[in-house]
Amino acid sequence: NTLQTLGDVLTRTREHSEAEDMYLSAIEMYREIGADLGTAHTLVSLGQLRQMLGNDNAAADAYAEALPIFQELDDVVGEANTIQAQGQVLLSQGNLEEAFEHTLSAMALHVMADNALGIGACHGYLMRIALDANALAEAIVLGARAYQGFLEISYVHGAAVTLQELGASFMQTDPTAGAACLLHAEALLRELSDPMAEDIASDFEAIEFQPEALASIRPHAAAIVQALFKGAEASAARGECDPYRLPSTTDAESTIKIAAEPQEHRDQNAQEIAKDV
């Protein structure tokens, strides 16, 4: 629909008021002609716009209207995406546990639909929630699964964004791991000629990360990331963390300890991996 498309274009060009008007006009037209699927998709776009503008309640209302339409149409992917969007509203409101549960529900639907992109995205959203909850061990495993899932479908941009978010979260607690994630993300983005690569380079300058340290990490960044992910998956396999359960506050200390694998162990793993690269 032209009105919906114009709304999408206006959203990208940051003409937000005009975009909302276009979405509302498209929804009205879709309802008049009985185009339920178009109505549901445009409601989700409207919700995303409102959420981007910080109007969580209005966004939630739009998603609540869209969800039963997708369910009635048996559109599993549309239902999953809407539930995921609801989870992002909950995350914005600080309700981490409900946001986590919504995202798990969305991922289960994507699994039913065999939608690899949705499964990867949900792992990325779960990682973000785990990071906000200071569940570092779980976040690394979820990040590893998002990263790998995206690469398996050749969605390199998604893999890079996952690394960027994970790396940024580690810059204070584990600068070596954080820098490796960011450098590997930068390399992937440069392969795509994506301008986001320059943003990462600027971030290093802003935090005054020593160029000599970056130079020593850069050649081994991919191996360090693989070692980080390998160690996290091993912890999950031993039952030391469950990436699909958000730890309670009382679990916080243990999950931090699991995430804080001794750097010499990671370095040894990285060296072994680098030999095979």
Image (cartoon, grey):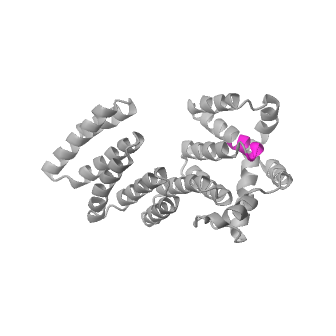
Provide residue 201's location: percent of width, then percent of height: 66, 30
Provide residue 199's location: percent of width, then percent of height: 60, 30
Q: Does the magenta-highlighted stretch encompass residue 170? A: no
Residue 223 shows up from this direction: no
> What range of the chain is rendered magenta?
173-181
**In-front residue for pair 18/40:** 18
Residue visible at 75% across and 46% down?
A: 174
**In-front residue for pair 56/123:** 56
**How many marks can you see?**
0
Taking 253 as reference, is 247 left or right?
A: left
Query: Is the residue 18 above or below the residue 254 in the image?
Result: above
Q: Quadrant of the N terminus?
A: top left
Label the magenta part by its dominant secondary structure.
Answer: helix
Taking 57 as reference, is 199 left or right?
A: right
Residue 7 shows up from this direction: yes
Provide residue 48's location: percent of width, then percent of height: 38, 45
Q: Does the magenta-highlighted stretch encompass residue 178? A: yes
Query: Is the residue 100 above or below the residue 171 in the image?
Result: below
Provide residue 24's location: percent of width, then percent of height: 23, 42
Taking 22 as reference, is 274 left or right?
A: right
Residue visible at 44% across and 56% down?
A: 87
Residue positioned most to the front:
250
Residue visible at 73% across and 58% down?
A: 259
Please tell me in which quadrant of the rendered image residue 102 appears.
bottom left
Please tell me in which quadrant of the rendered image residue 73 appears.
bottom left
Residue visible at 71% across and 62% down?
A: 253
